Image: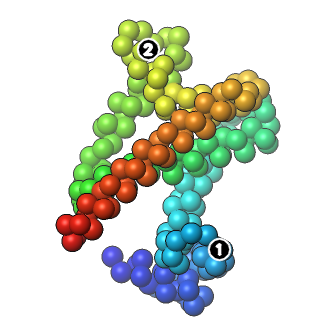
Amino acid sequence: MWDTGEYMAAVKVLGLPHPPGNPLFILIANAFAKLPLPGGYAQRVNTLSALMSALSAGIWFLVIGLIFGVHINEGVPGAIVMMLLVTLSGLAFGGIGAAVALRTGRASVVQGLFPLVFVILFLSSAFFPQDLLTGPAATIAQYNPLSFIVEGIRDPVISSLTWEVFGKAIASLVLVFAIGIALSSMALRRRIRMGG
């Protein structure tokens, strides 16, 4: 649990924390933390850390797809759009996980959300095209924000990138971001009020 403080101190003075030290992260975080962004020094470093984690998920998503032979019809711009949407998805849904963590104070509860994520995933167009879904599953998938996000990620691969699909994906991400930020803010206020 002392890693966070150790890394903050190392970033501030351009030092190296315990081995292996992650010197590239230290250099990037030091430069990022000096940007005139809102929040304190530690908050900016933590924001960078979350952004880099989400970006690494996007990179892996793209690399695994390319290894398995995915052809992106939109080429490099399509790959950039996919990376952007996957990265923003990681940040948006991470906000909901952070809200649960702040509210409960237990990692096990956050990990227990995994089955719920599967339900949300399977009630979207992530695995099955919407025209193959029937009954209540089709209705839920039609309004599930994840369906719009997945369609935005899928669009550059299977067809040409359209602003309508991209706009719906971004709007859905904004909605999930707003929910995550609102829930996190409420949970943090409650935790501060209760002194823990």
In this picture, is 150 found above or below 57? above
Looking at the rendered structure, the secondary structure element under dot 2 is helix
In front of the other: label 2 or label 1? 1
Mark 2 touches mark 1? (CB < 8 Å): no
Residue 162 can be seen, yes or no: yes
Quadrant of the drawing holding the C terminus:
bottom left
Quadrant of the drawing holding the N terminus:
bottom left
Horizontal and vertical percent position of residue 49: 53, 66
Residue 24 can be seen, yes or no: no
In the image, what residue type sits under mark 1? Answer: Pro
**52 sits left or right of 97 in the view:** right
In this picture, is 196 found above or below 158? below
In the image, what residue type sits under mark 2? Answer: Ala
Residue for badge 2: 138
Q: Earlier in the sequence, mark 2 or mark 1?
A: 1
Horizontal and vertical percent position of residue 145: 49, 31
At 51% from the left edge and 61% from the top edge, which residue is drawn?
50
**101 sits left or right of 38 in the view:** left
At 60% from the left edge and 55% from the top edge, which residue is drawn?
55
At 79% from the left edge and 42% from the top edge, which residue is drawn?
76
Looking at the rendered structure, the secondary structure element under dot 1 is loop
Horizontal and vertical percent position of residue 176: 47, 41
In this picture, is 73 found above or below 31? above
Question: Callout 2: 10 Å neighbours few (<14), some, many (20+)?
Answer: some
Estimate the spatial distance between the alpha carbons at disc 2 and disc 1, rounded to whole Å.
46 Å
Horizontal and vertical percent position of residue 5: 41, 82
At 37% from the left edge and 34% from the top edge, which residue is drawn?
118
Residue for badge 1: 36
**54 sits left or right of 179 in the view:** right
Q: Name the one closer to the observer, 69 or 87.
A: 87
